[in-house]
Image (spheres, rainbow, N blue to C red):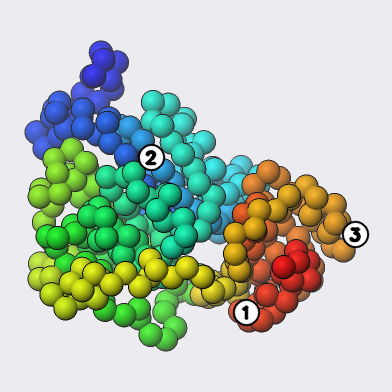
Amino acid sequence: MNAAERLRYSRQILFPGIGEQGQEALLASHAVVVGCGALGSFQASALARAGVGRLTIIDRDYVEPSNLHRQWLFEESDAAEWLPKASAAARRIAAINSAVEVRGIVADLTARNAEELLSTTALILDGTDNFEARYLMNDFAVSRGIPWIYGAAVGSYGLAMPVIPGHTACLRCVYPDPPAGVQPTCETAGVLNVIISAVASIQVADALKILCGGASQVQPRITTMDLWNGGIRQIAAPARDLDCPTCGRREFSYLEERRRPPVTLCGRNAVQVQERERPLDLADLRERLAPLGDVRANEFALRFRVEPYEMTIFPDGRAIVKGTNDEGVARSLYARYVGN
Ligand SMILES: [Zn+2]
């Protein structure tokens, strides 16, 4: 550590839980934030301020005005410029701490790219909003022995749970299957902004312990909170289920899923389509679509409005079709305007 770093992190070094050795470890560490919406943008900001040396931020979405009340890294200009969250986050992180080597990845985490995006990290932070992604992270983390920290929030309620492979219960020990039926989401049930920072803070505290002291420092417990109606509880996480398909039998079905079906973005009247990796030239597509409807594009994405739908198309071939929950309609629009 040089003199400037020693000064910058002096109050954190004074904290006995971290100390000089912990700070050195943080500066040399790499963490991945999967999903940079509300939870993820707080996590990324806190880790950058703490001096984590390398940060990878993965997000498939773009900044919208309705994100700004709870997504701490973003500003009005990000929504006006219609930036992908991963790019806007990387830019803001560079302004917060220019020494952090930050990589913003505009992509959907899938079984196909998990190895490439997650294999070099010491820690994965859950900033996602869906179980599909969490089971995939759980499979990958358990298969490689990488700690990850689950977190979720909606309304005024939230929870957090660290998963230390081989030591604590994994996500599927606690929730063997994804929840059935319609689930409340921030889009349908609303969300209090401070539950986000509260849950993300619990996640980041465990992350810092793991990165600077080792996973054995982390208590296997589940924290639940309701910041409006009161009540913060911490309970011991259940013991590992030896018959758990993931950490017991080591069957990684989410990771082995090679073909990803279209995904409905619950509660948002939107469907994500990606049949396969198919790089697109957005400038070319923009020219083709210009006579057919309102089209805008930058290097990160193309937005095409054809009433009553709106398609956002990314350079990797992925598209988000707004205005429908019907996968067939989304596929059809994709086929009609992008081609497949
Ligand atoms: Zn398990």
Q: Residue furthest right?
A: 291
- According to the picture, the residue beneath numbered tag 1 turns out to be 327
Quadrant containing the C terminus is: bottom right
- Disc 1 or 3, which lies upstream in sequence? 3
The response on whether ligand 1 sits within 8 Å of label 3 is no
The amino acid pointed to by label 1 is: Glu
Q: In this figure, which residue is indicated by the disc labeled 2?
A: 55
Q: Which residue is mark 3?
A: 291
Looking at the rendered structure, the secondary structure element under dot 2 is strand
Q: Foreground: 98 or 300? A: 300
Would you place residue 54 above or below residue 206 in this image?
above
Q: Residue at x 25, y 13 (%)?
A: 3
In the rendered structure, find residue 283 and report the number of the disc placed on it: none
Residue occupying image coordinates x 61% and y 68%:
275
Instruction: Give left or right: position of 326 versus 223.
Output: right
Image quadrant assignment for residue 311: bottom right
Identify whether 303 is placed above or below 226: above
